[in-house]
Image (cartoon, coloured by chain):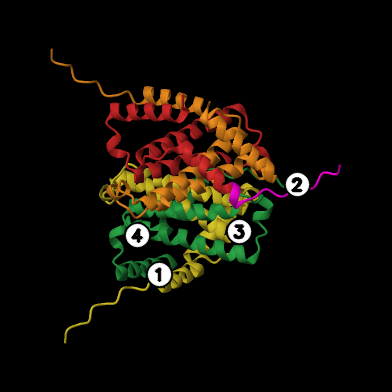
Chain colours: A orange, B red, C green, D yellow
Amino acid sequence: MAELDDLKERLRSFAAARDWEQFHTPKNLAMALVAEAAEVVEHFQWLTGAESQQLDPATRAEIALELADVLLYLVMLADNLDIDLADVAHRKINLNEKRFPPPARPEQKP
Amino acid sequence: MAELDDLKERLRSFAAARDWEQFHTPKNLAMALVAEAAEVVEHFQWLTGAESQQLDPATRAEIALELADVLLYLVMLADNLDIDLADVAHRKINLNEKRFPPPARPEQKP
Amino acid sequence: MAELDDLKERLRSFAAARDWEQFHTPKNLAMALVAEAAEVVEHFQWLTGAESQQLDPATRAEIALELADVLLYLVMLADNLDIDLADVAHRKINLNEKRFPPPARPEQKP
Amino acid sequence: MAELDDLKERLRSFAAARDWEQFHTPKNLAMALVAEAAEVVEHFQWLTGAESQQLDPATRAEIALELADVLLYLVMLADNLDIDLADVAHRKINLNEKRFPPPARPEQKP
């Protein structure tokens, strides 16, 4: 069963039960998306790259919930625009593979 | 098969083939995440809510690829922090269900 | 006396007194800048355009302080990169004036 | 003469000459603000903190224009909400001074 479809269904029910669909225009969801992405950034802004790789468990747990928020708004926005997220993500990787060809591997000595 | 794990595996291979793991600290990935989320916002900033619901196909296709970018960086960041995105997304919906209980439905007259 | 220089001087003293210059790399300040800008966005994400023009005084006062945060990080970042903000802002308006010429005014009937 | 008022006046004339005031709701300007802040972030996302302090002149010139964009939207947003940016920035520094008292200086030996 598709994980993203699963989330999409739960989020549809959640919004419907609260009569929140009226607020979920693509414009508004895009704003919520960037606001949540920025909350992720806030956790890292004063850390060095190395420190960002050694988070204490409490901070990591908080960040996990911020990442969840980003995913939830992303799924709602894609749903609203009738975009298949998994499909377009694979298409984007395909494009990136053409745009950034991997460096040639050195010949293997026999 | 899990969609998010699928993407995670492709992204790991993609980064490894280009020796890009060195750039993928959580701090840097968080920056890339917010930058991509803001590119989504840019498409909507001068539209009304109603206009944002009636995109022409070309704009919609561009936005789809921006949403893909957000998802790709989100998956990489979660992978880097060893966070299970689908799991934490469901936990976050659970929390939201408690935090925002749906309004009581009016009693149905018999 | 230049307002932006004034702020720059106060912010330099503030950081120096707390030994915070070490955290104020351009990279980190750019992260703080976007995080603060997103806090502004958060206030507006569920409002219509019209509602955003009719804020209650308490919300407006909160947003004022968020705008202040954006300005403070912007001044710090510009200072760190030795960029004259007022000067480059005027240069950018000059560029925009060329890029977006105003529509010709209709001839006035005599 | 106040730098920020100067910019405010030029931006008012710029928008009026193009009949763009209709797009400049606080909601829309907040979106433009975060989009521009994220363009600043994009320049720094793959750099180390140290690299971000040693930009080549071309990159620095590009970033200067991005900072200008942030300032211009900030000034427009503040104008639209009738907020005095310089005043609130000083008030915010005052608040920060109380919130983060500087560490006591060690006693000077006589």
Mark 4 vs mark 1, CA separation in Å = 12 Å
Asked if badge 4 and badge 1 are on a common chain, one would say yes
Question: For the residues carrying marks 2 and 3, which lies nearer the camera in this image?
Answer: 2
State the residue at coordinates (70%, 44%).
A19
Mark 2 vs mark 3, CA separation in Å = 41 Å
Looking at the image, residue A98 sits to the left or right of residue A8; the answer is: left
Question: Mark 2 falls within which chain?
Answer: B
Mark 3 vs mark 1, CA separation in Å = 24 Å
Image position, residue B89 (x, y; %): 50, 40
> Do we see residue B42 in this rendering?
no
Circle 2: residue type: Arg
Query: What residue sits right under mark 4 in the picture?
Result: C79
Mark 1 vs mark 2, CA separation in Å = 58 Å
Q: Secondary structure at mark 4?
A: helix
Looking at the image, residue A70 sits to the left or right of residue B9; the answer is: right
Q: Could you say which disc has been placed on residue D80 in the image?
A: 3
Whether the magenta-drawn stretch holds residue D7 is answered as no
**Badge 3 local density, few (<14 within 10 Å), some, or many (20+)?**
some
Circle 4: residue type: Asp
Q: Are marks 3 and 1 in contact (CB under 8 Å)?
A: no
Q: Nearer the viewer, residue A87 or C54?
A: A87
Q: Could you say which disc has been placed on residue B105 in the image?
A: 2
State the residue at coordinates (17%, 84%).
D109
Circle 3: residue type: Asn
Question: For the residues carrying marks 1 and 2, which lies nearer the camera in this image?
Answer: 2
Asked if badge 4 and badge 2 are on a common chain, one would say no
Query: What residue sits right under mark 1 in the picture?
Result: C6
Q: Secondary structure at mark 1?
A: helix
Question: Which of pointers 4 and 1 lies earlier in the amino acid sequence?
Answer: 1
The region drawn magenta spans B97-110
